[in-house]
């Protein structure tokens, strides 16, 4: 009943508070949605008691790179996240999401977004023009976990100047700045871009700097899928650092890595660049998923020019036999500055995870060579046909690196954990398992991190980077977002053959003081809130 105080006592657990301080055995008392005391509390009266003996009591995990933007409206429990202990996720990634979205661009934009975040006819797209509209829609959907939003650069650019591949005018730059201010005023945490995705990829550095200057006025963060994660990664990192230098914004790299064996030697220089930027006073951080394979939309294997003007124009180009030949030539010979996924992963190292049409579901789980064999065609043309029939709404995963690199980046002080989980079809197993995998594989089994360090990288560190007030720590006055897990059994279960498996070892999850996972089972409560800057 409203107005009544509900006290919840968590007792006898090993408390890891998210600060990286040493864990200790103790208790935690919650009143309604807030933590009121932490420590050795002795006899305390409570309305409900959870005996956490033999378990770790940690803050709820914060997923700083999420693609639940559509699912949080259509299936708001978002169980793949909540079941792995995630209590907050950051939406609006990679420079393309739902809003801002002018009416005249709804149809082409849905096609552009589909390969990354999916699509749905159950959403009232015409009612989603701004961040304010979208955050209100999430609140009305009663989300299963806390959600916050980054205003996407691609959406800003689209509203200001459409989807064409050209430089903006001075007036259009001013319009982008105005849009950024409007969306930050609505509560966005910062700006995201995906410099391999259209239309973000059409922008020069100055355009991004001007947008970031506006977000920096609100102490926002700049979250970037950089222009290259492969051959040109060093110049790409220098560009991102220069954006931070000129705009004064906090810089956060998405899914930090280096792709392709020829580029593995560049890791030392990547690390040096981060150190140099920090020494100069530029705030730098990054997130990472704990796997040697990545995941995105399959359309990224096509050269950038194929996407000029949006998905409808891409589909027209795929109808042209001569342009297909040019696409194959550019994929096989490369274009300077373009991240060529086929070059670093190989046709046999790229696998389809999702399609929207039932007739093509037989390709899910196959690599591009196998799709060619199944269709009785050259693999390139088989893939072009697939992208055409699916209107570019195809997901994929690709193998890019090796285990020792994952560990090297994971143990750096700038790192925090994320899922980068694309939710459709037969997804990358990170959707279900990133956080338990770190705790099971890299903490317990490989001892690459201490338990306290790992929990900080999942809780206190991301809350600090994204400016999430009163979240991320077990501390008096903070919101009661909590994960209780068994450190001896926690582990991810999904693999690339059968990814949709919930992890083991997570017994309780509380969101804003409500028990949403009880003895490993979802209670049906949707206790999430929209978190604004």
Image: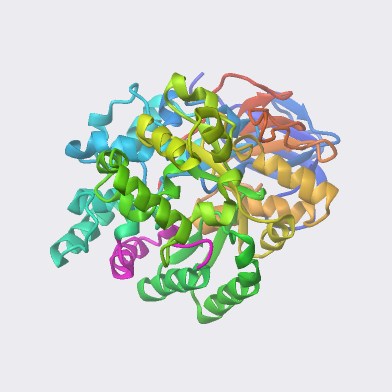
Q: Quadrant of residue 255?
A: bottom right
| 128 and 428: which is toward the camera | 428
Q: Outermost residue toward the left?
A: 171
Is 291 located above or below residue 333 in the figure?
above
Is 40 located above or below residue 199 in the figure?
above
Examine the rendering and report whether any part of residue 423 can be seen. Answer: no
| 255 and 84: which is toward the camera | 255
| Residue drawn at 31 percent across, 48 percent down | 323
Q: Is residue 220 magenta?
A: yes
Residue 90: x %, y % from top left? 48, 45
| 23 and 440: which is toward the camera | 440
| Region of the chain picked out in magenta, as a range | 203-231
User: Is 427 displayed left or right of 322 in the figure?
Assistant: right
Examine the rendering and report whether any part of residue 335 can be seen. Answer: yes
| Residue drawn at 26 percent across, 56 percent down | 181
Q: Quadrant of residue 490?
A: top right
Is 502 located above or below residue 383 in the figure?
above
Residue 530: x %, y % from top left? 43, 38
What is the basis of the colouring in this image?
rainbow
Q: How many marks?
A: 0
User: Is 123 displayed left or right of 290 in the figure?
Assistant: left
Residue 488: x %, y % from top left? 85, 39
Q: Is residue 119 magenta?
A: no
| Residue drawn at 42 percent across, 71 percent down | 239
| Residue drawn at 50 percent across, 61 percent down | 252
Residue 188: x %, y % from top left? 37, 49
Is 74 located above or below residue 136 in the figure?
above
């Amino acid at each position: 009943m409203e107005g009544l105080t509900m006290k919840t006592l968590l007792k006898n657990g090993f408390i890891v508070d998210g600060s990286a301080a040493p864990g200790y055995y103790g208790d935690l008392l919650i009143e309604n949605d807030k933590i009121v005391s932490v420590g050795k509390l002795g006899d305390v009266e409570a309305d409900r008691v959870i005996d956490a003996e033999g378990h770790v009591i940690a803050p709820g995990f914060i997923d700083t790179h999420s693609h639940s933007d559509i699912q949080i409206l259509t299936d708001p429990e978002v169980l793949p996240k909540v079941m792995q202990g995630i209590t907050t996720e950051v939406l609006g990634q990679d420079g393309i999401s739902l809003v801002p979205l002018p009416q005249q661009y709804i149809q082409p934009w849905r096609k552009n977004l589909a390969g990354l975040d999916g699509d749905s006819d159950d959403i009232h797209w015409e009612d989603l023009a701004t961040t304010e509209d979208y955050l209100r829609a999430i609140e009305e959907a009663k989300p299963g976990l806390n959600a916050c939003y980054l205003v996407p650069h691609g959406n800003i650019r689209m509203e200001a100047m459409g989807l064409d591949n050209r430089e903006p005018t001075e007036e259009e730059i001013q319009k982008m700045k105005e849009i950024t201010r409007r969306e930050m005023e609505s509560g966005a945490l910062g700006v995201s871009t995906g410099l391999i995705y259209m239309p973000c990829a059409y922008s020069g550095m100055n355009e991004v700097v001007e947008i970031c200057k506006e977000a920096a006025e609100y102490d926002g963060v700049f979250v970037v899928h950089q222009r290259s994660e492969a051959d040109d990664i060093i110049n790409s990192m220098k560009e991102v650092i220069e954006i931070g230098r000129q705009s004064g914004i906090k810089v956060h790299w998405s899914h930090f890595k280096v792709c392709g064996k020829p580029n593995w030697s560049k890791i030392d220089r990547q690390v040096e660049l981060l150190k140099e930027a920090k020494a100069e006073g530029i705030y730098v951080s990054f997130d990472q998923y704990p796997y040697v394979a990545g995941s995105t939309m399959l359309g990224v294997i096509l050269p950038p020019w194929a996407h000029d003007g949006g998905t409808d124009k891409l589909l027209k180009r795929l109808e042209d036999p001569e342009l297909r030949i040019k696409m194959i030539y550019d994929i096989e010979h490369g274009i300077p500055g373009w991240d060529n996924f086929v070059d670093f992963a190989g046709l046999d190292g790229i696998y389809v995870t999702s399609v929207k049409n039932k007739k093509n579901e037989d390709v899910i789980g196959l690599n591009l060579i196998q799709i060619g064999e199944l269709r009785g065609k050259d693999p390139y043309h088989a893939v072009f046909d697939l992208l055409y029939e699916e209107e570019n709404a195809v997901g994929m995963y690709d193998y890019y690196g090796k285990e020792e690199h994952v560990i090297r980046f994971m143990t750096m002080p700038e790192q925090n954990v994320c899922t980068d989980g694309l939710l459709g079809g037969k997804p990358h197993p990170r959707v279900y398992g990133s956080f338990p995998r770190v705790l099971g594989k890299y903490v317990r089994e490989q001892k690459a991190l201490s338990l306290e360090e790992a929990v900080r990288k999942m809780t206190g560190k991301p809350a600090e980077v994204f400016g999430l007030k009163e979240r991320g720590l077990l501390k008096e006055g903070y919101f009661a977002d909590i994960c209780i897990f068994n450190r001896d059994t926690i582990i991810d279960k999904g693999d690339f053959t059968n990814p949709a498996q919930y992890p083991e070892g997570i017994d309780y999850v509380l969101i804003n003081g409500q028990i949403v996972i009880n003895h490993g089972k979802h209670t049906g409560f949707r206790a999430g809130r929209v978190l604004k800057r």
